[in-house]
Image (tube, grey):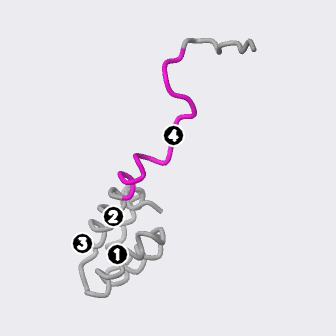
Amino acid sequence: MMVSKYEVSGAPRYATPIFPIEGERIRCLMQRLRPQLRIGTHSLVTLGHFYLDIVDHACSIEQFSCEAQGGSDKRAYFEGSYSGSPSRFRG
């Protein structure tokens, strides 16, 4: 799960009453992260950082990996302008 989607889904907002312990919130976050992000944030977890620090770090890793890949995973099949009708192949 992407970190931004986890934040938007409302889990952190409702996690405080459900998971009053900081460690439990971190454990739930780590279970839902993609393996790449889980590996990248594991060192912060072992050092005892707070939940929001781990979320911020995971967001920065995710943003960096998206930029390194050249943007989002969704790419258009065709580039250029749309003329309204497909061109006919005459060959």
Residue at image mark 2: 61
Q: Say which of 28 and 83 sits in front.
A: 83
Q: Give the amino acid type for the residue marked by disc 4 in the picture.
A: Arg
- The answer to which of marks 2 and 1 sits earlier in the sequence is 1
- Eye-nearest disc, 4 or 1: 4
Specify which label sits upstream in the sequence, 3 or 2: 3
Locate residue 82, reporting x and y percent.
53, 17
Task: Calculate the distance from the C-alpha at mark 2 to the C-alpha at mark 1.
Answer: 9 Å
> 3 left or right of 51?
right
Q: Of circles 3 and 1, which is in front?
A: 1
**Coordinates of residue 17 in the picture (x, y in percent):** 34, 74
Q: Residue at x 42, y 52 (%)?
A: 69
Q: Which residues are magenta?
A: 65-82
Name the image quarter holding the C terminus: top right
75 within the magenta span: yes
- Kindly identify the amino acid type of the residue bearing the numbered disc 2: Ile
10 Å neighbourhood of mark 4: few (<14), some, or many (≥20)? few
Q: CA distance from mark 3 to mark 1?
A: 10 Å
